[in-house]
Image (spheres, rainbow, N blue to C red):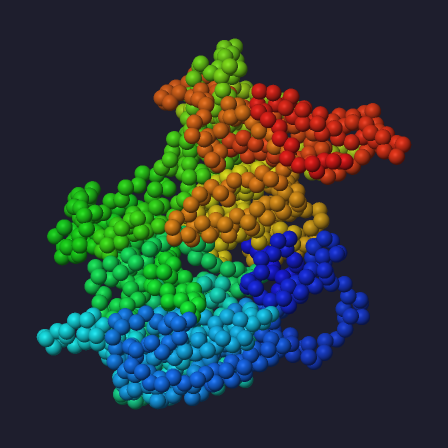
Amino acid sequence: MGPAPTGEQLCGAIGEPEVMEPALEGTGKEGKKASSRKRTLAEPPAKGLLQPVKLSRAELYKEPTNEELNHLRETEILFHSSLLRLQVEELLKEVRLSEKKKDRIDAFLREVNQRVVRVPSVPETELTDQAWLPAGVRVPLHQVPYAVKGCFRFLPPAQVTVVGSYLLGTCIRPDINVDVALTMPREILQDKDGLNQRYFRKRALYLAHLAHHLAQDPLFGSVCFSYTNGCHLKPSLLLRPRGKDERLVTVRLHPCPPPDFFRPCRLLPTKNNVRSAWYRGQSPAGDGSPEPPTPHYNTWVLQDTALESHLQLLSTMLGSAQGLKDGVALLKVWLRQRELDKGQGGFTGFLVSMLVVFLVSTHKIHTTMSGYQVLRSVLQFLATTDLTVNGISLCLSSDPSLPALADFHQAFSVVFLDSSGRLNLCADVTASTYHQVQYEARLSMTLLDSRADDGFQLLLMTPKPMIRAFDHVLHLHPLSRLQAACHRLKLWPELQDNGGDYVSAALGPLTTLLEQGLGTRLKLLAHSRPPVPEWGISQDPPKHKDSGSLTLGLLLRPEGLTSVLELGPEADQPEAAKFRQFWGFRSELRRFQDGAIREAVVWEAASMSQKRLIPHQVVTHLLALHTDIPETCVHYVGGPLDALIQGLKQTSSTGEEALAVAVCCYDDLSRLLWGLEGLPLTVSAVQGAHPVLRYTEVFPPTPVRPASSFYEPLQERSSLLPRLDKPCPAYVEPMTVVCHLEGSGQWPQDAEAVQRVRAAFQLRLAELLTQQHGLQCRATATHTDVLKDGFVFRIRVAYQREPQILKEVQSPEGMISLRDTPASLHLERDTRQLPLLTSALHGLQQQHPAFSGVARLAKRWVRAQLLGEDFTDESLDLVAAALFLHPEPFTPPSSPQVGFLRFLYLVSTFDWKNNPLIVNLNNELTVEEQVEIRSGFLAARTQLPVMVIVTPQDRKHSVWTQDGPSAQILQQLVVLAAEALPMLEKQLMDPRGPGDIRTVFRPPLDIYDVLIRLSPRHIPRHRQAVDSPAASFCRGLLSQPGPSSLMPVLGYDPPQLYLMQLREAFGDLALFFYDQHGGEVIGVLWKPTSFQPQPFKASSTKGRMVMSRGGELVMVPNVEAILEDFAVLGEGLVQTVEARSERWTV
């Protein structure tokens, strides 16, 4: 779809957007300076528009140098386009550390080394005797149970080694972390320290003593603790420099045992190193049952023993191959944008580095490959390899004493062994996380294979936070409820293995349970655990329940989402008992039409919005039944925005059913039109041309039956007239239908004559519908209004050659030429393009049921910001359609909520100035045609509207945005969307509940100069307001359905009529903004140019007064009189006129 390019890309290759979002937050001052420098270079020629680089003839035809030829050959072999190479090189420059910063970091590391080795020693004491610790420091570990054997003394580290990505040159900005391994002297450790957390207790005490002494050193700006990859048994000490370099680097100190201290055979995944008698406080069972293995505990010990060997392996493989290092950096950016590397169990940058090493060792990656090729190769491997089923190993040894891969598969969800053959690098990665990585890799490969122009932008520069990537999200809060779940699921061995971390212990069984229950509704289930925040050295370490919430993301299948039935096995099958046990009291026997008697679960859902939320019922039922987690602790975020598009009396529906009823009524009417007898010409086509008929009307119409007490009947015209002593009647909008008649030689060739013939057809149509079908009709020269089943349709007769007749222009010599005229373009848009668009979007709704909700929420938000008058229905529908037709890097939304978030993101980041939004309806445009459209757009940019939307039927002119918005209004929408998106995402990701979801829909009124407040009595759509009133006026509709012989009042909306008068009278002085859906306020902005003194003219005194300036008479706006006119024009409708600013002072 071509989102806005970021400032990191080369000027000349890609232009600057009006509103930019940095690719990676906090990328440093250099990036900002470069961006501003590029902006000043790019913008002057035409206010930010892209300009071709101008070269002299000599430069244009100069022979390429050998270096340039080699560069071109490399680009052809290693990248698929020059643009991609430029983009990748710019990104790598942006995320890589500069040499100056490396020097400052190296200097800081030398200082750290000197201070660490000078920390004084402590005499030996029992592990449980911690009185020697100073008062200002706490042990960064939960010592449960507290009693443990062993002694501890502090000695300075035997060796201080920098490990990790910093030395390899693969660490990326903005967060630069340098890992330093502190090898503890052998004298501190004892033979059986691998048992019962003794090693981890000593490690924590070692860090506590270091922290106390380093915190007193003026070199450090902050000294605090954090968990290593979220593992609460393995804290690390974080050091940051003082002063201006505080954000430059974070040094993480990791104590580790001496080489070969622990016997590897004791740390295999089948061994136990946490005794049940010690951990549970129970005497061992006398039945001789073996101790449960502790594979995760053993892995955490092994990880500390392998820090240096892993560094050596990575250094050997990646050392001199710059392409491999670039590939690792790109993969880290890819993971970060998808939030896959966060929290415990994340797929970290270290894992992808080791994966690159594995692919090099198996000859699937060559050391001469470019970073882009490495990225592709790794993504291809991840997309096609399931490490939850077939693990991989870096170990080349055939030693029979090594454990088999099957042993690791039994203990871990994901298996990737290091070169020792004993350590599973993916021990903490859950099956859900790996499946998410696989899924994202498959999406990314599809995107790369498409060779889209914006592939790089979508792959590496577009963030994919969970709330925007998944259809529904649920938060489990508070986390302490998972403790009860562990007891219910009998997860004692897992708790023992995880050192009491009940969140990690319960996570696997929990996700398996929900995946089984959601079945065909679910495409992907992912989880996110927020990283445990750092804590001060004088504080106790955070408890498991304090680490925020557990968030689960559900990516749903639209085809299975709305089924209310879970079909089980037949009653006499052995599987029936398992089905009943799984679903509990929800399972019941049912007889089906084929005679079968089966177990089944039926969910309560009447409307489409309730069916979309069936996963909520499934999740809460299963969690309460199997894990004792009550519904109050499950905060499900799937439909909080539905309330904004619910009708007054349809609190359980978002209007899809009402829209379907209206469409069904239209289908009946079209059949009646097809079958009419007595028309001089037969009907050749009947096409809908109204938002209702493409399912995108914000508030769908309901059948109307006017109450006679609200109207004065005009019997001679079979019409109604609103009574002045009653509130404004309900707003009824007719639905436009275009009725094409067959061609004939009898049609005249004169434009005015054609209009008269059409008027005759309109009258005849009304007569025949009344005679043959008893429908109430009212005919005019341009249309026929038909009342059918309480709905009003406005039928327009169309003649296919009329637009061409209107294009005919006769020269003085009598020559006839064809030229587009405003009348021909308007008629062609209304009778040909609009019906085609309505048909295409109707088809899109059948394919993607969430399209209706997304488009309606988008329009509701734009109109709530008082900007709806500037954006046509069709333009906003097309922007919403783009989210489904071009969803990359996401998949098409299956819920209105996630679609609306992506709408806000698209509006706020798309480069409207330098790119057309191509909406490829029915997939009619080929890749070549899209390239041609983009190049034609750049060539004709100055003649095109500010916002350009291209469809297969409208490739050059962007007919739906010809009349607006202006550049200022579009910019205002972009700014509002950029502010609303993070606010709404923060609300939806709040585990305590989203709060007031309507906040982002309320318009900012402080930007307006004048506010005109209206009386609700005369606002027919008052109940559609964002903050729906508790009580409003009766609008003259009977609640009982029944036939009505009188045509209701159509399109009567006093605020809109008042706005027309205001714009007609004062449009040259001010802009007027209003929310047509029940808004009580009209916002007025003065035009700055209107307050410049004008020369005195007797013909232009409207709204102005005469003043003397420098001896000359000039005209300036008479603001007080204008404000008085606002009230006079809207007498009865206007309550107050508030002047909010003094900006009109001349």
Residue 409 sits above or below residue 1059 on the image = below
Give the residue at x 63% y 47%: 971
Give the residue at x 48% y 19%: 1047
Quadrant assignment for the N terminus: bottom right
Toward the viewer: 368 or 823? 368
Residue 508, by quadrant, is bottom left
Residue 372, by quadrant, is bottom right
Toward the viewer: 585 or 1070? 1070
Horizontal placement of 1031 versus 723: left or right? left
| Image location of residue 42, percent across then percent down | 71, 60
- Is residue 73 visible in this depiction of the protein? no
Toward the viewer: 802 or 703? 703
Residue 1025 sits above or below residue 1051 on the image = below
| Image location of residue 166, percent across then percent down | 52, 78
Give the residue at x 51% y 33%: 1077
Residue 479 sits above or below residue 805 on the image = below
Given the current orientation, which residue lies at the most extreme right position?
1111
| Image location of residue 967, percent across then percent down | 66, 45
- Is residue 191 visible in this depiction of the protein? yes
Given the current orientation, which residue lies at the most extreme left position?
287
Residue 743, by quadrant, is top right
